[in-house]
Image (tube, helix red, strand yellow):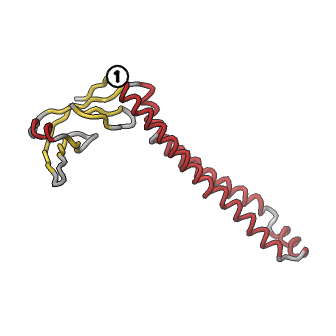
Amino acid sequence: MIYYETMDDSERSFLLKKWEKEKVVFMRVLRTLCFIFIVLPCCLGIIMESVSRSYDTPEVLRQKEIDEPHVYLFYFLGMLALLMIVGVASYVNYSRNLKQIRKDIKTGYKTIEQTHITRKLAMNNNTFHFYLKSAFKLSIEVSKEEYELYEEGDEINIEYSSYSRIYFGHF
């Protein structure tokens, strides 16, 4: 069973901090993509064209103008295609991550899902895990006390943000 509840201030502030961090990472990646896909090819194209033309005689340059009159148009269309690739990749990344977190912050609701423990597992490094019968979260790490308190088949509630699916906790 799934139901919705308003977020606490701590959960909302956690999402705000996460949104700020993700926004910084997104902008860093966007700047890097713009440099790699736009600035670098533009500079390399200008340098290569300048070097190529520096060895040509005026007659060869006039012949190139006649043979390839739209060389700058093709160069511009190539740069436009690279800009579109960066734009589409940025939009998809924004829609999948930052937009979902922003929706959660605006709505202020979280999802609470009642699920059952399918398996308990104690690891060698003193961590304890519950495997759940949930489409959202397959396993959660719990304390030793919770591990000893709950049994397989017991019901447990997990909390997560509704759109971005960020796990808050369980009870």
Residue at 14 percent across and 33 percent down: it is 155
Looking at numbered disc 1 in the image, what kind of residue is underneath it?
A: Thr
In screen coordinates, is 152 left or right of 111?
A: left
Q: Please give the count of numbered marks on the rendered protein.
A: 1
Q: Quadrant of the C terminus?
A: top left
Q: Quadrant of the N terminus?
A: top left
Q: Is residue 50 above or below residue 97?
A: below
Mark 1 = which residue?
6
Query: Which quadrant would residue 120 be assigned to in this image?
Result: top left
Q: Is residue 21 above or below residue 109?
A: below
Q: Is residue 129 above or below residue 45?
A: above
Front residue of this view, candidates 155 and 25 = 25
Residue at 27 percent across and 25 percent down: it is 3
Q: Residues within 10 Å of mark 1 (few under 14, many from 20)?
A: few
In screen coordinates, is 82 left or right of 4?
A: right
In screen coordinates, is 24 left or right of 149?
A: right
Residue 16 in the image, given as x and y percentages of width and height: 44, 32
Residue at 74 percent across and 67 percent down: it is 47
Query: Which quadrant would residue 162 be assigned to in this image?
Result: top left
In screen coordinates, is 75 left or right of 105?
A: right
Residue 93 in the image, given as x and y percentages of width and height: 49, 45
Residue 123 in the image, given as x and y percentages of width and height: 16, 52
Judged from this view, the residue extending furthest toward the right is 58
Residue at 77 percent across and 60 percent down: it is 72
Residue 20 in the image, given as x and y percentages of width and height: 49, 37
